[in-house]
Image (cartoon, rainbow, N blue to C red):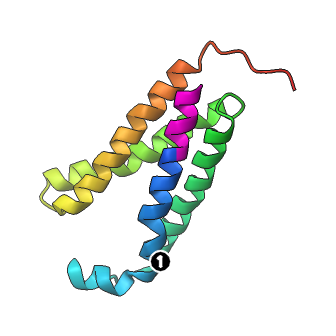
């Protein structure tokens, strides 16, 4: 169970460090990866939803057994971004830097599946 706790806490911390600065970097992103962001609602909406998931990962890290069913949608969250980044890169529509972020999500997806698997036969503690 210690493995699961660590995996989800590390995922939450990594996500916060990667996502929070993005709230203040819209113009930098537009400058470094043109064209400019034309639909800011998608940009900020993505960041907001992704940050909300970091709270979910922290909850999973706090009590993996209690929240074990949430490991499935957490894995899907990581797979959706990671897979999209891989496909876009293979279509030559994505930078190597963004692919790296997608690969991190694919790594976390694999670790989430492993955490789910390792907690399968652990009985819930009495409360």
Query: Which residue appears at 14% of the width and 55% of the height?
Result: 91
Q: Secondary structure at mark 1?
A: helix
Is 31 situated above or below 91? below
Q: How many marks?
A: 1
Which residue is at 61% across, 48% downward? 58
**Of 31 and 7, which appears nearest the observer?**
7
Quickly name the residue at label 1: 23
> Picture quarter containing residue 125?
top right
Viewer can see residue 90: yes
Tell me what residue is drawn at x 47 percent, y 77 percent: 23
Position of 87 compared to 109: left or right? left
Residue 54 among those drawn in magenta:
no
Q: Is residue 5 magenta?
A: yes
Front-lying residue, 91 or 16: 16
Quarter of the image with the N terminus in it? top right
Q: Position of residue 112 (x, y in %)?
A: 47, 34
**Magenta stretch secondary structure, dominant:** helix
Name of the residue lying farthest toward the left: 92
Percent across and percent down for residue 25 are 38, 81
Horizontal placement of 119 versus 123: left or right?
Answer: left
Start-end of magenta stretch: 1-9
Q: Is residue 66 left or right of residue 121?
A: right
């Amino acid at each position: 169970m210690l493995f699961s706790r660590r995996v989800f806490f590390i995922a939450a911390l990594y996500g916060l460090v990667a996502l929070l600065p993005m709230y203040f970097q819209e113009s930098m992103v537009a400058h470094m990866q043109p064209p400019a962001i034309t639909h800011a609602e998608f940009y900020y909406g993505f960041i907001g939803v992704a940050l909300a998931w970091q709270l979910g990962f922290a909850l999973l890290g706090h009590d993996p057994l209690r929240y074990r069913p949430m490991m499935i949608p957490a894995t899907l969250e990581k797979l959706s971004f990671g897979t999209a980044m891989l496909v876009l890169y293979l279509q030559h529509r994505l930078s190597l830097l963004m692919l790296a972020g997608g690969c991190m999500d694919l790594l976390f997806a694999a670790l989430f599946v492993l955490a789910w698997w390792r907690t399968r036969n652990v009985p819930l503690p009495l409360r």
